[in-house]
Image (cartoon, helix red, strand yellow):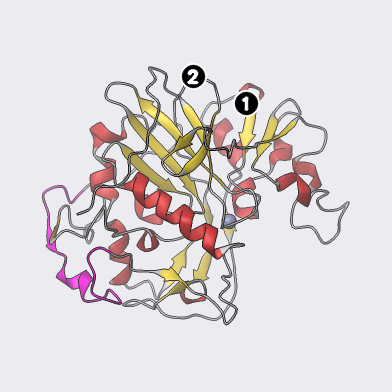
Amino acid sequence: MSTPPALNIPPSPSTVTVSIINTTISVPFPVSLVLNPVIGVQRLRSFGINPTIEKDVPEILEEGGLDLKEVNAVIWSHHHWDHTGDVSKFPSTTELVVGPGTSKMWPGYPANPESLLLESDYKDRPTREITFDQSPTGLKIGRFPALDYFGDGSFYLLDAPGHAIGHMCALARTTATPSTFIFMGGDTCRHMGELRPSLYLPLPTTLSPSPLFPPKTAYTTSCPADLFLSLHPSGSATEPFYTLALDKKRESLVCVDVGEAKQTMEGAREVDAGEGVLVVMAHDASLSGVVECWPATANGWMEKGWKTEGRWRFLADFVGDDGGDARL
Ligand SMILES: [Zn+2]
C-alpha cells in the first residue's frame, strides 16, 4: 500500500453541522455508456434516462423542520439538472453560490430557449461565483485549490474541474478532536468502482463486513475478495474497477475535460485514503442504508463506523440481480 500525499488541511477548532440529504432522485442509466468495462451482471440496456423524483430538496428540508428563511445560501456543486434542485422555491434572500465559469452559461431558459439552466434559479436573488486562487501560494487541500468559505477552517470549497464547467467539491470539518471530515465529491465519479480500489486503498484479501449482506446486519460477517478480483478487468487489487468510456475522439459523455476529470479523480483517491475523511459522492447508492440522512446529522460518522461499513459495498453491484441499470 502506498502512502498518499499529505492533504495539508490547516488546523482549526471550528466545525460545521453536516446532514446528507436523500434527494429521492433515481436516474436509471446504462453503465456501459459512460464506464468501462461491463462487469459481472451489468449489461447494456437501451438508451434512455427516465428519472424519478419524489420530492424536491426544499420540501425535504421543510419536512425535517427547517424554515427556508434560515437558508443563507445554496451552493451548487455544478449546474446539472440532477444537482441544482429548484432554487426558485427558496426565499429571494437565499444566495446562489456557483463554481468558476457557471455564470457564463447564463441567461438560462426561457431567456435562452436552448439553455439547460433555468433563469428562475438565479434571477432576482443574490448570486456569487467562486474564484479560486490558482497561484503557487494559494490555499490548497491535497491537490485541490481551496477556498475557506466561512474563514474559520470549518468548510472549504474545492476547485474540482473536469466533469462540468465550474464543478466544485467541498470538505467539511465534522469533528475537531480528533479532526474528521466529510468530502463532498459531487459528480467526481458516478460509481465507486471508478474510485476504488487504489494504490492507497487496495482491495483487502478479506472484506469485513461483507458487502453482500444488507447494511447494518453485517458487522460480524466477512467474505474473501477473490470473487470480486476475478471480475476486475485486470485482476488488480490496486486499480479501480472502472475507467471512463471514451469515444473515438477520446471524449466522454460525462466529462467536459477528460484530462481534468482524471486529475480530480486522483485527488479524490488521495482524500479517500485518509481514515479521517468520509467520501460522499452525490450518486453513491452504495451508502444507502449505511449513512443516516437529514434531518439526522452526519458528524458522528467515524464513531458510527460508516466509512468501514460503506467502503466496499459498491462491489455488491457486480454480483446482484438488478439487471445492470446503475442508479446514478
Ligand atoms: Zn453532473
Tell me which residue sits at (55%, 22%) in the image.
150
Question: Which residue has dot 1 on it?
Answer: 71
Question: Is residue 283 shown to the viewer in this render?
Answer: no
Q: How crowded is mark 2: few (under 14 residues within 10 Å), some or many (20 or more)?
A: some
**Magenta part of the protein: which range?**
217-238
Q: Is the residue 146 above or below the residue 193 in the image?
A: above
Q: Is the residue 267 above or below the residue 278 in the image?
A: below
- x and y, in percent, of residue 38 in the image: 39, 78
- x and y, in percent, of residue 17 in the image: 44, 25
Q: In this view, does 167 lie to the left or right of 300?
A: right
Q: What residue type is labelled 2?
A: Asp
- x and y, in percent, of residue 112 in the image: 86, 55
**Where, by quadrant of the figure, is residue 248 drawn?**
bottom right
List the single residue furthest toward the right.
111
In the image shown, does 1 or 311 lie closer to the viewer?
1
- Residue depth check, mark 1 versus mark 2: number of the one nearer the observer: 2
Tell me which residue sits at (49%, 19%) in the image.
152
Question: Which residue has dot 2 on it?
Answer: 152
Tell me which residue sits at (36%, 44%) in the image.
271
Any magenta on residue 183? no
Q: In this view, does 180 lie to the left or right of 168?
A: left
